[in-house]
Image (spheres, rainbow, N blue to C red):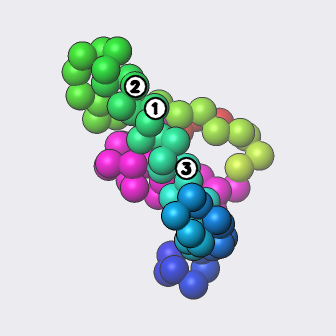
Amino acid sequence: MDDKQMMQYVVNISHGWRTISPEYVGSLILKQLRETAEQNLSMPLHRAVMAVPAEFDDQQRNYTRMAAQLAGGIYIYMYT
């Protein structure tokens, strides 16, 4: 999927305006969850299981996978 097909949003962050994608926001959330899990488990996390709504179409599932890759290459198993 090329960048032209991806949604982009312009947001005002404390240091000014930035253009971000929903996948980027998702990756920030997943990265924080990963760091918290690694601290609690005292070991690195390489794989995760993620439940997504049954209504998600293939594109939404792909965006979720892309967010996981942006979060540090977490390989995820998806269940609906």
Q: Quadrant of residue 10?
A: bottom right
Q: Is residue 64 visible?
A: no
- Give percent across and percent down for residue 35: 36, 31
Question: Mark 3 falls on what kind of element?
Answer: helix
Of the numbered discs in the image, which one, if any, rests on residue 26?
A: 3
Mark 1 packing: few (<14 Cα in 10 Å), some, or many (20+)? few
* Alpha carbon distance from label 2 to label 1: 5 Å
Mark 2 packing: few (<14 Cα in 10 Å), some, or many (20+)? few
Q: Mark 3 vs mark 2: which is more N-terminal?
A: 3
- Give percent across and percent down for residue 58: 63, 58
Question: Mark 1 falls on what kind of element?
Answer: helix
Q: Quadrant of the C terminus?
A: top right
Disc 2 + disc 1, Cβ < 8 Å: yes
Near-viewer residue (79 or 3)? 3
Looking at numbered disc 3 in the image, what kind of residue is underneath it?
Answer: Gly
Mark 3 packing: few (<14 Cα in 10 Å), some, or many (20+)? some
Residue range in magenta is 57-77
Disc 3 + disc 1, Cβ < 8 Å: no
Find out whether residue 56 is within the magenta segment. Answer: no
The residue tagged 2 is: 36
The residue tagged 1 is: 33
